[in-house]
Amino acid sequence: MVRLHEVLERWLSGRAPRTAEEFAAFARAHMPGFTLSGPDGSSLTRDQVLAWVEAAHGRTPGIGIRIREVELVAVDGPLLVAAYQEGQRGTGADRNRRATAVFLRDPVAPHGLRWRHLHETWMPETPAG
């Protein structure tokens, strides 16, 4: 999970070259049928997510993504469910979100897991000070 966010951060910042091979590191981690429930209530398919990410190469040069408080929620055979917090900085709209992800074990997938579903929710903003 952390490694995929590192791949995403490199892609969005433009630190990764814009090649099919580099993008494949992100795309292969998402299985056919992957869905995303975004923190704004949107619902996206795998194709929509991949198209957005591919087009966003280098658009956020200062982005930093931090994953913390990872918790394994459930394991049932090849399925795993994990919850975590994600913080993004350097985007111009820095926000934190909670996420719950469903994974399927796949020995040929990057890091042995493929993303099946991701649900994100905005966390309340904390006043500065």
Image (tube, rainbow, N blue to C red):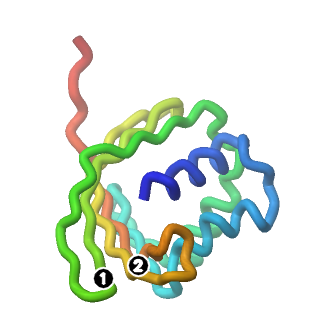
- For the point 44% across and 52% down, the residue is 2
Tell me if 89 is positioned left or right of 41 in this view. right
Q: For this rendering, which residue is in front, 19 or 106? A: 106
* Mark 2 vs mark 1, CA separation in Å: 9 Å
Crowd around label 1: few <14 · some 14–19 · many ≥20 (10 Å): some
Q: The N terminus appears in which quarter of the rendering? A: bottom left
Which numbered disc, 2 or 1, marks the residue that appears first in the sequence? 1
User: Against 42, is 64 above or below?
Assistant: above
Disc 2 to disc 1: CB gap under 8 Å? yes
Q: Which residue is mark 2?
A: 116
- For the point 29% across and 76% down, the residue is 80
Q: Which of the numbered marks, if any, corresponds to residue 129?
A: none
Q: Residue 26 location, x and y as percent?
A: 60, 65
User: Against 125, is 30 above or below?
Assistant: below
Q: For this rendering, which residue is in front, 52 or 85? A: 85
User: Against 117, is 85 above or below?
Assistant: above
Q: Amino acid at mark 1?
A: Leu
Residue 21, by quadrant, is bottom right
Q: Residue 107 location, x and y as percent?
A: 50, 82
- For the point 50% across and 68% down, the residue is 111
Q: Residue 55 location, x and y as percent?
A: 70, 58
Q: Determine whether the residue tagged by mark 1 lies in a helix, strand or loop.
A: strand
- For the point 32% across and 74% down, the residue is 102
Tell me if 25 is positioned left or right of 122 in this view. right
Q: Amino acid at mark 2?
A: Arg
User: Against 75, is 123 above or below?
Assistant: above
Q: For this rendering, which residue is in front, 15 or 72? A: 72
Q: The C terminus appears in which quarter of the rendering? A: top left
Crowd around label 2: few <14 · some 14–19 · many ≥20 (10 Å): many
Q: Residue 69 location, x and y as percent?
A: 24, 46
Q: Which residue is mark 1?
A: 79
